[in-house]
Image (cartoon, rainbow, N blue to C red):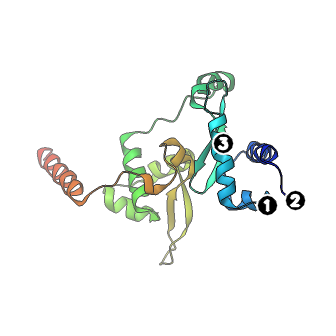
Amino acid sequence: MKLDRVKQKASVEGILFTMGDAVESERLAAALEMTEEELAGIVDELIADYEDDSHGIMITKVGNKYQMCTKTSCYEDLIRLCHVPKRHVLTDVMLETLAIIAYKQPVTRMDIEAIRGVNSDFTINKLLEYHLICELGRLEAPGRPILFGTTDDFLRSFGVSSIEELPYISTEMVEELKSEAEEEAEIGI
């Protein structure tokens, strides 16, 4: 039974609100008996409906998933209500480790430590605690090390809908950064 457009929008809205977490577009379209293209059109309309300042919620796309969430403009009020710290502070070391994981995923702890040159247990555990990274499985190798990758929370936090939207780092830029790091290392000797 096909629903009219108003009821379709209401159904999408109700499902996203109730689910809380991001819902895969394929799964949502199947539940509503429509194509993913039809669903995308409805979600685009809902996104436009929520754009003005009279709404405290929005619908966001994260990869191939949709999620209803609070607008950032409401965070201060929400934080006062929940007595939750504003946000996690990411140190330079955490950002460096997060960048390695984002660009190299899936990646093992040993790979991260080989790039950074130091033990990364604490940093990886903090990134797991902040839900910016997750365990993706295990590498088929001796010891079966854990593979890490980024999460939907990472994408939302950095304002991208997929890993492909991360800035491209050219070979020249890598060489330039490597050269700068080597110079800094020599100065410290």
Labels 3 & 2 near each other (Cβ < 8 A): no
Q: Quarter holding the N terminus?
A: bottom right
Who comes first in sequence, dot 3 or dot 1?
A: 1
Q: Which residue is mark 2?
A: 1
Give neighbour class at mark 3: few <14, some 14-19, many 20+ (Cα, 10 Å).
few
Q: Which mark is residue 118?
A: none
- Residue 76 in picture, x, y percent from top left: 59, 23
Give neighbour class at mark 2: few <14, some 14-19, many 20+ (Cα, 10 Å).
few
Tell me if 149 is positioned left or right of 81 in this view. Answer: left
SS type, badge 1: loop
Labels 2 & 1 near each other (Cβ < 8 A): yes
Who comes first in sequence, dot 3 or dot 2?
A: 2
Three-letter residue code for mark 3: Glu
The Cα–Cα distance between marks 2 and 1, rounded to whole angstroms, is 8 Å
Q: Nearer the viewer, residue 1 or 162?
A: 1
SS type, badge 3: helix
Tell me if 79 is positioned left or right of 9 in this view. Answer: left
Three-letter residue code for mark 2: Met
Residue at point 76%, 62% (across, down):
30
Answer above or below: position of 16 versus 50.
below
Q: Which residue is mark 3?
A: 45
Q: Which mark is residue 33?
A: 1
